[in-house]
Amino acid sequence: MSLRHWGATPDEIARSYFADSALPGSVTLLTRAVTVAAPASLGYRWLCQIAVAPYSYDFIDNWGRRSPHALTPGADDLFVGKRVQIFDLVDVQPGHEFTGRTIPSAERFFGPVALTYAAEPLDSGRCRLIGRLAVGVAGWVERVRAEVLGIGDLVMMRKQLLNLKEYAERDARAGVEL
């Protein structure tokens, strides 16, 4: 494991995601992934829950409010321009993946960041949830910021993907219909 890639296969690391080209100039790529015992359609629905809450450490990034433990109707109604946490969506492939770019206030703190979330099917009952960050690195300050961001993001996105995995697998076992 490295700070740049957690849980991702070599193919996922090498694959091109929309986030990779959503920023001008040079970027550092960070890839996080987890296998989920649930169909990709259910995995995608749980990824869309990020539009409702962050699903990582609620006491840190959700002001102590608990992220919902059930699917929120309409959370998967994503469209280009929609605000999702600290990102404005710049690409949506319904049922598969979505990509956002940091809003200006977040960019002042994190720097320019683009993020793709994807649900990749493995077979009819399993999928991979993937998070790919592209962090702008135009100068030495941005390169240092990208390294620090990589550490914090590893902690937060790992927890996020593991929480979403837990809920998707629970719903798959319960036979939740989409």
Image (tube, rainbow, N blue to C red):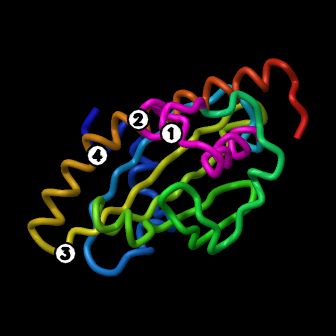
Residue drawn where x is 68% and y is 26% of the image:
167
Could you tell me the amino acid type at mark 3?
Ala
The quarter of the displayed image where residue 129 is located: top right
Which of the marked residues, 4 or 1, is nearer the chain's N terminus?
4
Q: Nearer the viewer, mark 4 or mark 2?
A: 2
Q: Which residue is mark 3?
A: 138
Indicate the position of residue 149 as horizontal and vertical percent values: 26, 50
Query: Dot 4, crowdedness within 10 Å: few (<14), some or many (≥20)?
Result: many
Could you tell me the amino acid type at mark 4?
Arg
Q: Which residue in the rendered view is the most extreme toward the bottom?
A: 24
The quarter of the displayed image where residue 47 is located: top right
Q: Which residue in the rendered view is the most extreme toward the right?
A: 177
The local secondary structure at tag 2 comes to: helix
Query: Dot 2, crowdedness within 10 Å: few (<14), some or many (≥20)?
Result: few
On whether residue 33 falls in the magenta region, the answer is: no
Q: Which residue is mark 1?
A: 62
Q: Contact, CB < 8 Å: mark 2 with mark 1?
A: yes
Could you tell me the amino acid type at mark 1?
Asn
Residue drawn where x is 34% and y is 67% of the image:
107
Front-most of 133 and 14?
133
